[in-house]
Amino acid sequence: MKIKINGKATSTDSSSLFQLMSERRIAPDNLIVILNGFQTPEDLPVHDGDEVVFIEKGKMPDRTEFEAMMSARHTPHIYEKLKQARVALAGLGGLGSTIAVALARTGVGKLHLVDFDVVEPSNLNRQQYKIKHLGMKKTEALKMELEEINPFITVLIDTAKIAEDNIPHLFAEDDIVCEAFDQPDAKAMLVNGLREHFPNKKIVAASGLAGYESGNFIATKRLMKNLYLCGDGTTEARIGRGLMAPRVSICAGHQANMVLRLIMGMEDA
Amino acid sequence: MITLNGRIVDDADELSVAALLSRENYVSSRVAVECNGRIIPKAQYEHKQVTDGDVLEVVCFVGGG
């Protein structure tokens, strides 16, 4: 029968996972076995068309096996849809950098990073940058991080300040745009510009995620046909109320999950 | 009579969008406004009038990101 092992089409006479392991002389120690997206320690039967991934812990696979291993826990047709998608991150602060990391791990095929700023120390309390990135353009620093997390996606960057006049040019090719700015006027400017120029484009925006109020107040709402808003809607950053990783991450998680749902064709919040 | 974020508002007919936003305590630079499913460009806030039966959605943003 024909099966796939670590992404490669293979013929075998083995009818179970343990037989396959002995046929390929793979020791069971330090081994992770994934059958059709499900990790198992058992000697399960193997059928024609199955996808099997063997991962030897601590051993660096070659590049062709690596992508099969990274996507081994995804359901195959989900992975293919994700790979076709192109998502923009407008602003690469606490929200944008965190959404980008989640979508890179999920395997979204093209991520488009847009920001004009450089990484500075006050970013490190909630943004996905490290000491080594201080002084770098956020676009370049985050691209570096994302390529270390998932080398099988394409990261496109535009180091530019987003304004009314460059919105039509910057976001023309993106299927979904995440609004991930800090300033309320900039958030409104981007959402207005996108809705005017691209009424059919999906926007996933954020409002109300500062402080350490309950994380349970943060929710995703569909407010217009193609506008989703994540956050509690009211808790703004102001003098005496900061922005910190836990609540910013909750909101970024909401945004990333809404993006994933939209890619999979689910339009309800 | 118009509908504003799902709420019936009786005395808004003939007001401009800018006047309505101001009366409802919105800061116009921080909102996006949709009228009957279409976005209203900011440049039209001053002269576009709200008319009877309009359904308006106002999305307001607060800072933090």
Image (cartoon, coloured by chain):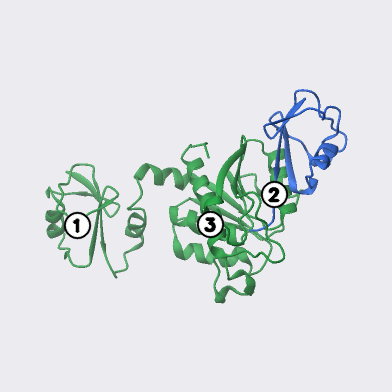
Chain colours: A green, B blue
Q: Amino acid at mark 3?
A: Ala
Q: Is residue A193 above or below residue A210?
A: above
The residue singled out by tag 3 in the image is A100
Residue B1 placement (x, y as % from top left): 77, 25
Residue A89 located left or right of residue A146: right
In space, the residues marked 3 and 2 are separated at their CA atoms by 22 Å
The quadrant of the rendering that contains the N terminus of chain A is top left
Residue A174 located left or right of residue B44: left
- Kindly report which numbered mark, 3 or 2, lies closer to the viewer in this rendering: 2
Residue A138 placement (x, y as % from top left): 62, 65
Residue at (84% x, 32% y) in the render: B48
Q: Alpha-carbon neighbours of circle 2 within 10 Å: few (<14), some, or many (≥20)?
A: many
Which chain's residue wears label 3? Answer: A
Residue A39 placement (x, y as % from top left): 26, 54
Location of residue B57 by image quarter: top right
Q: Are marks 3 and 1 on the same chain?
A: yes
The residue singled out by tag 1 in the image is A41
